[in-house]
Image (cartoon, helix red, strand yellow):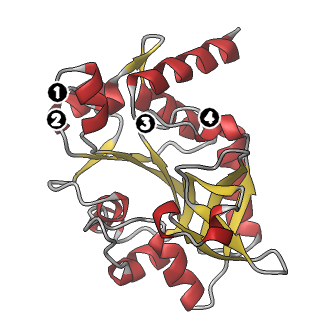
Amino acid sequence: MSEFRGLILAAGKGSRFQSEAGGAFPKVLRPVLGKPLVGYVVDTMKQAGIDDITLIVGFQAEQVMREMGSSYSYVRQTEQKGSGHAVACAKDAFESFDGHLIIMCGDSPLFTADTIKRLMAEQISSNAVITLASAGLEEPTGYGRIVRDSDGRIIGIVEEKCATQSEWAIKEVNGGAYAFDSRWLFSNIEAMAINEANEYNLTDMVRVALEQGRTVSAVNCDPSELLGVNTPAQLAVVEEIVRGRNQ
């Protein structure tokens, strides 16, 4: 099987969280049952068989690096200009890597190793340049919608604020965990377009791939896995789910 490495986005400031929770503290280090959020993401990757893991750090980078230790590689994102920009900062770190990358967010701790293993398997079997985790949500508000053609092929991801009325009604959403062909990703990452918020979204690489006629695939996961942490209330929900899994 092709080699997989891990890349975790852990540079964000989490301004919304801080305004509610108080204090300038890296969101990815917020504890859930005694373990930082990003620690769950790392553990999931390791359980899926990925041992070579790089973290993209930015806000209070030294604190994140100190907490996580020397078992990982680190890349700095000095400006916070979106998930796509964060990944672009790692281009030099993966210059000689010819395998695949699993890319996850450091504040999304509920993805399971099974989902990541299925992402990896689908990436190889479908010969995709991108495979993403998706889920069907009864209330998809806040998520990018996955648009498919009549044959079921993915033809785009539409961010909610850009969606038409028919796209708004789509229940299948992007979960935020990805497998990428590393060479393809970093050879094409400069084709990413800047969005209305003056940021680069990693999901725009789906557009790039489809315009090139490349394969984009997906694996379905449990809707609970998609839950990220942007507020103290969401942190409490995540903690309850983790507690339930541990029982």
Mark toward the start of the polypeptide (1 vs 2): 1
Residue type, label 3: Asp
**Residue bearing the label numbered 2:** 60
Give the mark count.
4
Q: How far is the residue under mark 4 from the one under mark 3? A: 18 Å
Viewer-proximal residue, 108 or 65?
108
View extreme (bottom): residue: 212
**Dots 3, 1 in contact, CB < 8 A:** no
Left or right? Give the position of 101 relative to 9.
right
Q: Which numbered mark, 1 or 4, is in the foreground of this view?
A: 1
Q: How far is the residue under mark 3 from the one under mark 1? A: 16 Å
Say if residue 58 shows up in the picture.
yes
Q: Which numbered mark, 1 or 2, is in the foreground of this view?
A: 1
Residue at 59 percent of width and 74 percent of height: 129
Viewer-proximal residue, 180 or 144?
144
| SS category of the residue bearing label 4 | helix
Residue type, label 1: Ala
**Residue bearing the label numbered 3:** 107
